[in-house]
Image: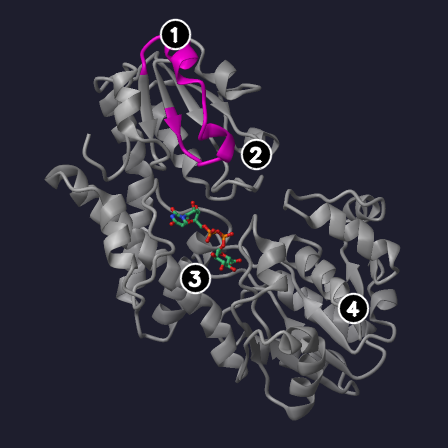
């Protein structure tokens, strides 16, 4: 099927490439000419394992195209995915839908034949109805359907998540739209991946309910981890012990410095606002938002405690800046609050991240960026693991101990076994485990 994808950000690019991979003829459109130029040379603007190779091979087969010309992309297309950003609106935390509305209007203006417009961006319940109104009033003559089809991709595992999904959720209001979506996802149905057809509002809410539930698991395990620290229990054992109950599930129970990223913080806040607007406040999600904010800030105090409650003028080495490994994404990364907290207390910050430093340089001020973990810890008063990159799992600790001014190691991701490190002479602290 000929498909247009509007917006070549994270979601649009991964979706477009994967739809081409399963055999569709996909044209991805973006206003950013530089980005499109680069993609036409197989240069991918984001770090996502496997993506560059797939862009190259699918362009080679002629199934994947990149353009800035929307009209061209829509020529002959039966379906158009909207995959533009929905950031948090700074003034009130609502999702900013201006890019969605602008995309809908442009699609309506340029559409040449009956079109199924599919919203892949994360949007509050009822946005599909508003998009429908925009298209109708812009092009009263156009035959069209509006569908909701949220994505459930994790950064760093996005290709796998698209190609082998837990489920595909489709919110449709007409038989025709359902038929077109069934055709788009036929290669997945053939492999027995579950496809759930619901109405549009149900689909829109499912995405927020999923992310908020995952955020809830994290806020919960982080609070239990705090309790573990004072009662001498081990959060790893608690996570395992509760996770083996299939009703709870083993995944998403790793305690850490609080969740970040472009999705959980924005989506939990947007769901809170939607619920308040409808006078059905989701008090549990409100709590999750504030627990997570508190958690991120508390981490800088934990680090200060390990430095005898004084970090003024001390050199703190931060290893890992991105909100999680295998991405270069710095959005809402816990490292930002942690570093700011330490700087407010007068610490000097040295930092290293395998992929995120370019993005970090735009966000973090007065930080010395280093080329490697070893360069970062040189003469440091403390080293802190903030993101669990694989390359930090196996560091030369004997050498590190010699190079540091004080062998203080704060492991906010529970990467290491504390005993051997302590035997080596490190003053080691992790989260939710007895020392
Ligand atoms: C998240 C969801 O997992 C995806 O299903 C969803 O599609 C996506 O948001 C989205 O809405 O687009 P992502 O933001 O890529 O994906 O990252 P996650 O892997 O979910 O991690 C989020 C945060 O939780 C990270 O800061 C991570 O370090 C933290 N985390 C995760 C933990 O602290 N502990 C865990 O056990 C798991």
Closest to the observer, 64 or 417? 417
- Mark with earlier residue (1, 3): 3
Q: Residues within 10 Å of mark 2 (few under 14, many from 20)?
A: many
As drawn, 226 above or below 424: below
Looking at mark 2, is its residue's CB closer than 8 Å to ligand 1? no
Read off the residue under disc 2.
Answer: 356
Looking at mark 4, is its residue's CB closer than 8 Å to ligand 1? no
Q: Quick check: 283 left or right of 352?
A: left
**Occupied quadrant, residue 194:** bottom right
Q: How is the image coloured?
A: one colour
Read off the residue under disc 3.
Answer: 211
- Label drawn at residue 402: 1
**Occupied quadrant, residue 396:** top left
- Mark with earlier residue (2, 1): 2
**Occupied quadrant, residue 107:** bottom right
Q: Quick check: 236 left or right of 34?
A: left
Mark 1 to mark 3 CA distance (whole Å): 43 Å
- Mark 1 lies on a secondary structure that is helix
- Mark 4 lies on a secondary structure that is loop
- Label drawn at residue 23: 4
Q: Residue at x 69, y 78 (%)?
A: 186
As drawn, 147 above or below 226: below
Mark 3 to mark 2 CA distance (whole Å): 24 Å
- Give the magenta range: 384-407
Q: Quick check: 332 left or right of 69?
A: left
Q: Is residue 67 visible?
A: no
- Label drawn at residue 390: none
- Mark with earlier residue (3, 2): 3
Q: Position of residue 411 (x, y in %)?
A: 34, 30
Q: Residue at x 55, y 32 (%)?
A: 360
Frontmost of labels 2 and 4 is: 4
Q: Residue at x 39, y 13 (%)?
A: 398
């Amino acid at each position: 099927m000929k498909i247009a994808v509007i917006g070549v950000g994270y979601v649009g690019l991964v979706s477009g490439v994967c739809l081409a991979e399963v055999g569709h003829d996909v044209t991805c459109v973006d206003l950013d000419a530089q980005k499109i130029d680069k993609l036409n040379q197989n240069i991918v603007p984001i770090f996502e394992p496997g993506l560059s190779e797939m862009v190259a091979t699918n362009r080679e087969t002629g199934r994947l195209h990149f353009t800035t010309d929307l009209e061209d992309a829509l020529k002959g297309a039966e379906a158009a995915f909207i995959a533009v950003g929905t950031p948090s609106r700074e003034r009130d935390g609502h999702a900013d839908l201006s890019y969605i509305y602008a995309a809908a209007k442009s699609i309506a203006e340029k559409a040449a034949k009956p079109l199924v417009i599919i919203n892949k961006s994360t949007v509050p319940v009822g946005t599909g109805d508003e998009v429908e109104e925009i298209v109708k009033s812009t092009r009263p003559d156009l035959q069209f359907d509006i569908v909701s089809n949220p994505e459930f991709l994790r950064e760093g595992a996005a290709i796998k998540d698209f190609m082998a999904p837990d489920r595909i959720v489709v919110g449709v209001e007409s038989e025709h739209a359902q038929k077109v979506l069934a055709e788009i996802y036929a290669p997945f149905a053939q492999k027995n991946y579950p496809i759930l057809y619901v109405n549009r509002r149900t689909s829109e809410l499912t995405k927020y309910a999923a992310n908020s539930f995952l955020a809830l698991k994290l806020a919960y395990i982080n609070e239990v981890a705090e309790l573990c620290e004072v009662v001498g229990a081990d959060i790893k054992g608690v996570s395992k012990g509760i996770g083996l109950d299939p009703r709870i599930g083993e995944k998403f129970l790793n305690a850490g410095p609080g969740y970040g990223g472009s999705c959980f913080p924005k989506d939990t806040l947007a769901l809170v606002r939607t619920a308040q607007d409808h006078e059905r406040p989701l008090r549990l999600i409100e709590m999750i938002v504030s627990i997570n904010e508190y958690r991120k800030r508390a981490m800088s105090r934990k680090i200060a405690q390990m430095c005898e409650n004084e970090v003024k003028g001390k050199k703190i080495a931060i290893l890992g800046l991105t909100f999680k490994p295998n991405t270069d994404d710095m959005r809402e990364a816990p490292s930002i609050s942690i570093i700011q907290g330490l700087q407010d207390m007068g610490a000097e910050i040295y930092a290293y991240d395998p992929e995120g430093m370019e993005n970090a340089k735009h966000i973090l001020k007065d930080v010395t960026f280093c080329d490697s973990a070893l360069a970062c810890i040189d003469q440091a008063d403390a080293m802190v693991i903030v993101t669990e990159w694989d390359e930090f799992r196996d560091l030369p600790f004997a050498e590190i101990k010699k190079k540091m001014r004080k062998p203080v190691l704060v492991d906010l991701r529970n990467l290491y076994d504390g005993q051997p490190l302590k035997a080596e002479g490190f003053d080691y602290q992790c989260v939710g485990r007895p020392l």
